[in-house]
Image (spheres, rainbow, N blue to C red):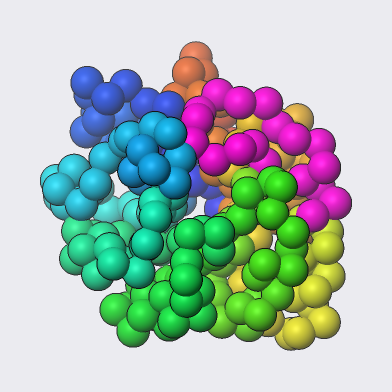
Amino acid sequence: MITIAPSLLASDFANLQQQITLVEQGGADWLHLDVMDGHFVPNLTFGPPVIAALRKTSQLPFDTHLMIEEPERWVERYRQAGADVITVHAEACADLSGTLRRIRELGAKAGVSINPATPLTAIEGVLSEVDLILLMSVNAGFGGQSFIPGTTARIQAVAARLKELNARAVIEVDGGIDDRTARLVVGAGATVLVAGSYVFSAPSIPDAIASLRHAGD
């Protein structure tokens, strides 16, 4: 089963509620929220107050990707705001295992993410502690980038290691996902697809979501 998580970063920020309704009615499974702090990544997006406001408008699980420094200071705020999945970057955590444990204590699913240039060894120690592994297929911090082809080999390596460990984490991929690249990443072992402009800029949002869902057919 493929999970489709449209990225709100690519939506029309002047009409967020309407945009969320469109993807919800179009068949999305999750809503992906890219949180950027202007430090860990160059851009700024939104924080807990906006997420709390959006939480009132949708029943979709909120897949919250924290591209921020010292995420351990903020996970409780994002959980209180309505985040269902909270993903932190291995590169940003002084105590990665402790941060993931705290997320789960708060009742959210815990995810870990790494950028394309970060070795997979950075997450080796937590593969059995997470619900989700987010492999960035672009450099974190900007929307609309092209898919990095080497991502498929990284997905395959993580999928193989999860099988060896009998770990239950799912693999999520974010960056440059469309109907073509979706087939590549699903074939490599990913089951959660984050797509921004491919969904929100599509002539038909339901058709775009359906094309991603059938990537494994």
* Rendering coords of residue 144 (x, y %): 55, 24
Q: Quadrant of the N terminus?
A: bottom right
Q: Position of residue 28 (x, y in %)?
A: 45, 44
Closer to the camera, 38 or 208?
38
- Above or below, comparing residue 196 to residue 121 in the picture: above
Q: Is residue 68 left or right of residue 134?
A: left
**Residue at the image position 32 percent from the left and 21 percent from the top:** 12
Q: Quadrant of residue 50?
A: top left
Residue 199 visible here = no
Q: Residue at x 39, y 43 (%)?
A: 39
Please indicate whether residue 156 sits to the left or right of residue 171 in the image: right
Q: Residue at x 61, y 78 (%)?
A: 126
Compared to residue 180, the image places residue 120 above or below, namely below
Q: Is residue 176 magenta?
A: no
Q: Is residue 28 left or right of residue 166?
A: left
Q: Check the image and report above or below for 64 versus 202.
A: below
Q: Main secondary structure of the magenta part?
A: loop
Q: Nearer the viewer, residue 96 or 214?
A: 96
- Residue 146 painted magenta: yes
Q: Which residues are magenta?
A: 137-154
